[in-house]
Amino acid sequence: MGVSSNFALLKDFAEETSSDKRRDLLRQATEVFLAEGRTMSQSDIATLDEVVQSVASDLSAEVRAELSRKISAAPIPFTRTARKLAMDDIEIARPVLERSRALSQTDLLDVIAQKSSDHMMAVTRRDDIGETVSSALVERGEDRVVVSLLENRTAKISEQTYERVAERAETSAALQAPLVRRAGVPLHLLSDIYLKVETDLRREILKQYEGVPAADLEAAFERSRTRVSRAYGALPENFDAVRREIDSLAREEKLTPPVLVTILRQGPHRRTAFVLAFAKLTDMNYELVDKLVATTDLDALAMLCRAAGFDRALFVTLAMLIVGKDAPMGRVKEFGELYNSVPLEAAQRAIRFWKVRAKLRA
């Protein structure tokens, strides 16, 4: 059947009033187009595409949905028809949004800007998502949209987009596991969210450090300068005086890990001294250590102690004192196992990220 015959089918369709016959005519015409499309000229395809998209407006939702399924699998570029269907209700749009090669990246951006979250979910399932589309999905999409994007292994995502996802993941638990488990996420961003995720995900992050070549780690450290951590709050009133005290101990070579136990046992009023001394001994910034102590984040404190070379017994004692009266002696074994569970090399690499962060902020 030639092009003129195809047009004749569409002419019959336009003149037909019976919905059943219109559907049959359109099905017959589209099947012919798809079968003969590879032998048609680009001009003829474009003309037929224009006719099909113009008559599609007169179809029932059921027929438009059937047309969408056919167009989504079409080997020829019915671009106008695909775009029109992509802007339709989601049950009609879904096939072309998920599979049609006739949609350009610009078409997808228009869908993201104008249509529903369900339309965006359909876009995330495509196998040709570029960086610009990924950026728009993260910018406008709900968490479920971003999760679906992260789980699409073929989607291209830029470092800037990963940064926005990491920022959202700090307060959205739904994004954390998909981000940590996606291949290709920059290591320095995983380091950023380490303190925000649960223990199991922390272990997964540490495992990712273990096999990373030194050159790749150094490159990650360099990229770290593009990220700025949030402020943790105002410093205590006695900060300067206590800092002079701790600096004096360091100059006199009296600032050793066991001193931390001594300071903690002096009572709550020595909290600033403990945090400053701990930060000094681990070469970390005050704000981070203060946050970890305030939230009793023993998992992260164990990593700091492990990386700094504190022995297991010292960490257990510090953990008991930090938890305070709520720590029964039965937890000694638990804290010891926590310390042992942190791989030394992985802890050292993770701490290097944090140190770079602190220096960049300074």
Image (cartoon, rainbow, N blue to C red):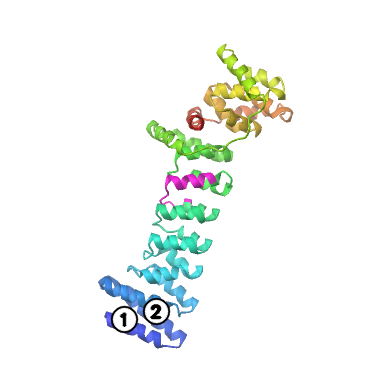
Q: Is residue 24 above or below residue 297?
A: below
Residue 291: in magenta span = no
Q: Indicate whether 151 appears above or below 255.
A: below
Residue 262, how many percent across, how many down? Answer: 67, 17
Quarter of the image with the N terminus is: bottom left
How far, Cα to Cα, is label 2 from label 1? 12 Å
Q: Specify the label residue 6 is tagged with.
A: 1
Please say whether residue 340 is visible from this viewpoint. no
Numbered circle sitting on residue 274: none
Q: Is residue 161 magenta?
A: yes
The answer to whether residue 330 is left or right of residue 341 is right
Residue indicated by mark 2: 27
Q: Residues within 10 Å of mark 2 (few under 14, many from 20)?
A: some
- Please tell me which of labels 2 and 1 falls first in the chain: 1
Q: Residue at x 67, y 24 (%)?
A: 238
**SS label for mark 2:** helix
Magenta stretch: give its range.
150-167
- What residue is shown at x 55% (from left), y 13% (from top)? 251
The percent coordinates of residue 85 (x first, y second) are 44, 70
Which of the 4 quarters of the picture holds residue 213? top left
